[in-house]
Amino acid sequence: ANSWDENWILSQLYFIFQIEIQTKICIKLLTFSILIYIISKENERKNIKKVGRKMKEQFLELLKQVKREGINELIEFIEKTDFFTAPASTRFHGNYEGGLVEHSMKVYEILKHKVETNMEPLNVNPETLILVPLLHDLCKANFYKIDYRNAKNALGVWEKVPYYTVDDTIPYGHGEKSVMMITEYMKLTPEEKYSIRWHMGYTEPKELYNTIGAAYKKYPLALLMHEADLEATYFYDI
């Protein structure tokens, strides 16, 4: 009986010992996983900031090519807003830090190509080709805010994660709001106004479809601008 008791005790001790070893291994693996997760998130954050700085530099370099009265004051205003860190949307295209400036740059790239390769030659002023795509979504500056909600991370642990919501302090519309904000500092040509105002195209209320069609016939650049905006959104998810 004593031998049986000793064997049973030894087996239980061995079992406990094995559990302790496995627990330590699990803790080490979990710690390692958490460290990898933290490092990857930090690298992702640094990469976003690096890309954001490059986009900001390119954006400002282009705007500074415009030699129009009020452009310097407009640039100063933009730099005081969150334009270069804001997302392009809350849940859809470019819904991340710096998404707005990245979207604007991609629209510029697409529109420039469209104008240069259009079957029907278009005579577009170089400044117009900079201002329209880069500033079409200026209305989204100081438009979003960060809030928090509970969600599980990659390790299955609940944590508070940030997400974007709308905080429209200037409820003046969309394209028309961009036109208003720009013209507070600098004049726009009619072609520029129409192209920015109607860049949303047929996503506008259907009651405006006739007006939009007439605008596109009057200024073909406005139609190409709408197409460039759609392509940046749906082809590049920016």
Image (cartoon, grey):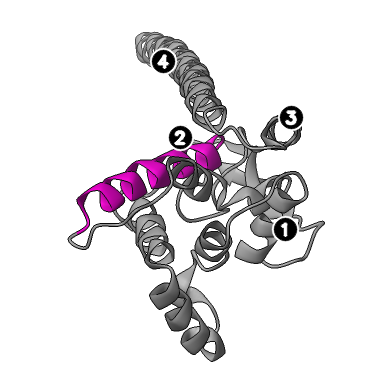
Q: Residue at position x 49%, y 41% from top?
A: 127
Q: Nearer the viewer, residue 50 or 217?
A: 217
For residue 10, above or below residue 138: above
Which of these two is toward me, 154 or 63? 63
Pick whichever, 123 or 228, lies toward us.
123
Numbered disc 1: secondary structure: helix
- How dense is the environment of label 4, judged by Cα within 10 Å: few (below 14), some, or many (20 and up)? few
Question: Are the residues at dot 2 and dot 4 in contact (C-beta closer than 8 Å)?
Answer: no
Disc 2 marks which residue? Answer: 154
Q: Nearer the viewer, mark 4 or mark 1?
A: 1
Q: Position of residue 167 (x, y in %)?
A: 76, 55
Label 4: element kind: helix
Quadrant (top left/top right/bottom left/bottom right) for the N terminus? top left
Label 1 vs 3, first from the N-terminus:
3
> Which residue has dot 3 on it?
76
- Mark on residue 180? 1
Nearest to the eye among marks 3 and 2: give it: 3
